[in-house]
């Protein structure tokens, strides 16, 4: 445990320990797998190296250095996040902002880069193991408002992390309030991505500033904007405790919508019946199923990954057994370099077996909604593994993607040459 936890961060709170994990069923219990690092999550050689260090009583510094080396091989910022999507004003990157899709800006508040409990598969861990140069921490909210003022096409701001709801309400309010200014009329919705409804529902019910949080949601509504809590639910069990249901109700009573999303994770939720159960429970509480994500190409991926075709089978297996109210769920979706790519299904076209794909979001808005086709590959787990069907040399978006990357590189080179980069 110590050997693994020095590489993969570990944190679990009493609520998860006492209410969510079924201790009669460990280590197989899905909530245990979701929160407790396991030896199989590291490559065997890495595990052996860390175990060796721990056993011979190596110094903290030595263990930390070895852990860092392994962490860097685990691809902490996939899909070009660090390089490609951080907007720049006057040559300088705007801290804490990622602007990949035209209408929506992601914001990573500096104080929200941790979580109530850590998920073992999480690709965000680079942000909370103290690799400072890899952090996208926002220093201040004014920079966000200033950026948005010049971006009239942005209609939605999504606070993410870590978990923004580890922040005190007073801190969160400092970030949210400037967005309610009349100069940002074009921003019609504010979303808060959080796992607090699942991992710490007290945040909305009994924490000292729970009522303040709900008042903040009400203030967003009063300013004429939509406020959505993008709730990360991995397992139906997270929706069962009374306190968890009460939290959902209080959020809704404050005028916020609860939309639900989670990645599909082997050993945690890789079952159609489980997703159908989860979506039904969400709809019963008035929450809206939103995304099923494909586990990203990062972290202990081999331990958790589900092949794309299998993911699609799980998705439709769940989709086929729920009412239309739960069919707001979309997926399985990959957040890949060019955009969010939906695995729409498997088909046979003119005798060729193909995977049908479609952009839900794209770096070039023109790509959105367009179906494209890959050769059927039952082992593929990510877009990079796929090859185009019908003898095509590349997917339709690849020339445009190269052009976008080249343009971005030219801007960067220009900045470096003219000394605009501080
Ligand atoms: C998912 C995502 C969004 C939000 O997309 P919606 O389809 O509007 O939910 C925004 N930015 C990035 C980088 C994302 O991955
Ligand atoms: S709550 Fe979200 S950001 Fe935090 S560890 Fe889990 S998946 Fe990662």
Image (cartoon, rainbow, N blue to C red):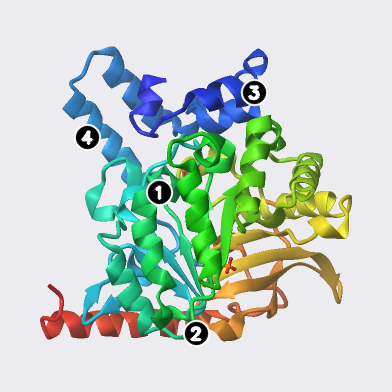
Q: Quadrant of residue 174?
A: bottom left
Q: Going from the N terminus, do you reach mark 3 or mark 2 first?
A: 3
Residue at point 15%, 76% (across, down): 421
Q: Going from the N terminus, do you reach mark 2 or mark 4 first?
A: 4
Q: Going from the N terminus, do you reach mark 4 or mark 3 first?
A: 3
User: Do labels 2 and 4 touch, CB within 8 Å?
Assistant: no
Disc ID at residue 28:
3
Element on which disc 2 rests: helix
Mark 4 residue CB less than 8 A from any atom of ligand 2 = no
Relative horizontal placement of residue 202, taking residue 8 as reference (left or right) = right
Per the model, the C-alpha gap separating discs 4 and 3 is 31 Å
Residue at point 86%, 77% (across, down): 350
Q: Going from the N terminus, do you reach mark 1 or mark 3 first?
A: 3
Residue at point 62%, 58% (across, down): 255
Q: Going from the N terminus, do you reach mark 4 or mark 1 first?
A: 4
Q: Quadrant of residue 357?
A: bottom right
Residue position for label 1: 169
Query: What quarter of the picture does the N terminus occupy?
Result: top left
Residue 361 screen position, x and y as percent = 58, 73
Query: What quarter of the picture does the C terminus occupy?
Result: bottom left
Q: Nearer the viewer, residue 328 or 227?
A: 227
Element on which disc 3 rests: loop
Q: Residues within 10 Å of mark 4 (few under 14, many from 20)?
A: few
Relative to residue 278, is residue 346 depicted above or below? below
Disc ID at residue 213:
none
Residue position for label 4: 65
Q: Which dot, 1 or 3, sits closer to the camera?
A: 1
Per the model, the C-alpha gap separating discs 1 and 3 is 36 Å
Q: Going from the N terminus, do you reach mark 1 or mark 2 first?
A: 1
């Amino acid at each position: 445990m110590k050997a693994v936890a020095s590489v993969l961060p570990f944190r679990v709170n009493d609520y998860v320990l006492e209410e969510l994990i079924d201790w009669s069923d460990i280590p197989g219990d899905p909530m245990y797998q979701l929160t407790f690092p396991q030896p199989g999550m590291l490559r065997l050689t890495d595990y052996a190296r860390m175990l060796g260090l721990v056993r011979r009583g190596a110094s903290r510094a030595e263990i930390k250095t070895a852990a860092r080396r392994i962490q860097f091989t685990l691809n902490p910022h996939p899909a070009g996040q660090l390089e490609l999507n951080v907007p720049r004003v006057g040559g300088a990157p705007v801290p804490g902002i990622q602007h990949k899709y035209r209408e929506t800006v992601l914001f990573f508040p500096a104080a929200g880069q941790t979580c109530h409990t850590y998920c073992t598969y999480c690709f965000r861990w680079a942000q909370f193991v103290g690799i400072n140069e890899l952090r996208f921490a926002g220093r201040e909210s004014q920079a966000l408002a200033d950026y948005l003022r010049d971006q009239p096409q942005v209609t939605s701001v999504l606070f993410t992390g870590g978990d923004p709801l580890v922040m005190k309400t007073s801190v969160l309010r400092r970030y949210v309030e400037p967005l309610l200014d009349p100069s940002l009329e074009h921003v019609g919705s504010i979303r808060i991505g959080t796992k607090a409804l699942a991992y710490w529902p007290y945040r909305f019910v009994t924490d000292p500033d729970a009522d303040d949080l709900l008042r903040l949601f009400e203030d967003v509504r009063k300013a004429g904007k939509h406020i959505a809590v993008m709730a990360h639910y991995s397992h139906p069990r997270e929706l069962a405790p009374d306190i968890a249901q009460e939290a959902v109700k209080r959020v809704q009573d404050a005028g916020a919508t609860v939309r639900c999303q989670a990645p599909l994770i082997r050993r945690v939720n890789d079952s159609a019946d489980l997703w159908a159960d989860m979506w039904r429970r969400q709809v019963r509480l008035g929450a809206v199923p939103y995304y099923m994500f494909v586990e990203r190409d990062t972290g202990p991926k081999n331990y958790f990954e589900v092949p794309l075709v299998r993911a699609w089978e799980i998705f439709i297996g769940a989709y086929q057994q729920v009412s239309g109210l739960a069919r707001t769920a979309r997926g399985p979706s990959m957040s890949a370099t060019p955009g969010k790519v939906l695995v729409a299904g498997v088909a046979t076209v003119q005798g060729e077996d193909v995977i049908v794909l479609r952009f839900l979001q794209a770096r070039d808005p023109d790509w959105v909604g367009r179906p494209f086709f890959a050769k059927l590959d039952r082992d593929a787990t990510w877009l990079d593994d796929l090859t185009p069907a019908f003898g095509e040399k590349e997917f339709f978006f690849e020339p445009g993607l190269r052009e976008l990357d080249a343009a971005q590189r030219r801007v960067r080179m220009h900045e470096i040459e003219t000394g605009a980069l501080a």
